[in-house]
Structure formats: structure tokens, C-alpha cells
Image (cartoon, rainbow, N blue to C red):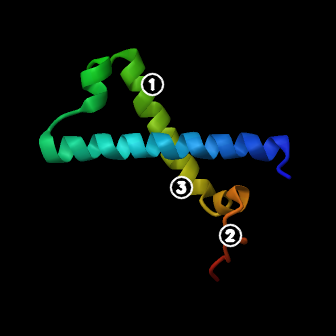
Amino acid sequence: MATPNRNVMRGIDLVAVVLIVIGGLNWGLIGFFGFNLVAAIFGELTPISRLIYVLVGISALYRLFLWRTVPRRLGRCEAVPRST
């Protein structure tokens, strides 16, 4: 049974993944079509669009630095072996 702390971390992991996907799709739209979806919805560098960009960046850093612990929290696999 998952502990409350583990459930919170799963929620954070899920939010981080969703934000990274949103950021990736937005960058894909910018690269392929020159269309910034976040700016189109929330305005060019408005406080809310800047907040979205900041959250996407923080999510990417979170996943970058904690990528080894996420599979264990999700219960998908055993510990990821460390390379020597």
C-alpha cells in the first residue's frame, strides 16, 4: 500500500510529466509552424504565460535530477542500477 508521501510524490511526478509534454508540444509547434500556443492562449509574456514557462522549466529540471527515483515511486520497475 502506498504511503501518503508516496502518493504526493506520484502526483508531483504526474504534473511534471504533463508540463514537460505541454512544453514539448509547444516547442514542436514553434519549430514546425512558428506558432506559440501558450502565447496564443495567454498572451505574449503575460504573467500567466511566464508562469507556465517557469513551471515547464522547473518540471524539466525535476525530471532531470530525479529521473532514477521516479520508476520506483511509480512501482513500474526495480531500482535503476547506477553505472560505475
The answer to the question of whether label 2 and label 1 lie on touching residues, with beta carbons closer than 8 A, is no
Amino acid type, mark 3 = Leu
First reached walking from the N terminus: tag 2 or tag 1: 1
Residue at position x 68%, y 46% from top? 10
- SS state under label 3: helix
Residue to which mark 1 is pinned: 51
Residue 76: x and y in percent read: 67, 64
Horizontal side of 6 relative to 55 (left or right) equals right
For mark 3, does the 10 Å Cα neighbourhood hold few (<14), some (14 to 19), or many (20 or more) residues?
few
Horizontal side of 58 relative to 10 (left or right) equals left
Residue at position x 52%, y 48% from top? 61
Residue at position x 29%, y 21% from top? 41
Does residue 81 sit above or below 71 in this rendering? below
Residue 77: which disc? 2
Residue to which mark 3 is pinned: 64
Does residue 62 sit above or below 34 in this rendering? below
Residue depth check, mark 2 versus mark 1: number of the one nearer the observer: 2
Amino acid type, mark 1 = Leu
First reached walking from the N terminus: tag 1 or tag 3: 1
Residue 69: x and y in percent read: 68, 60
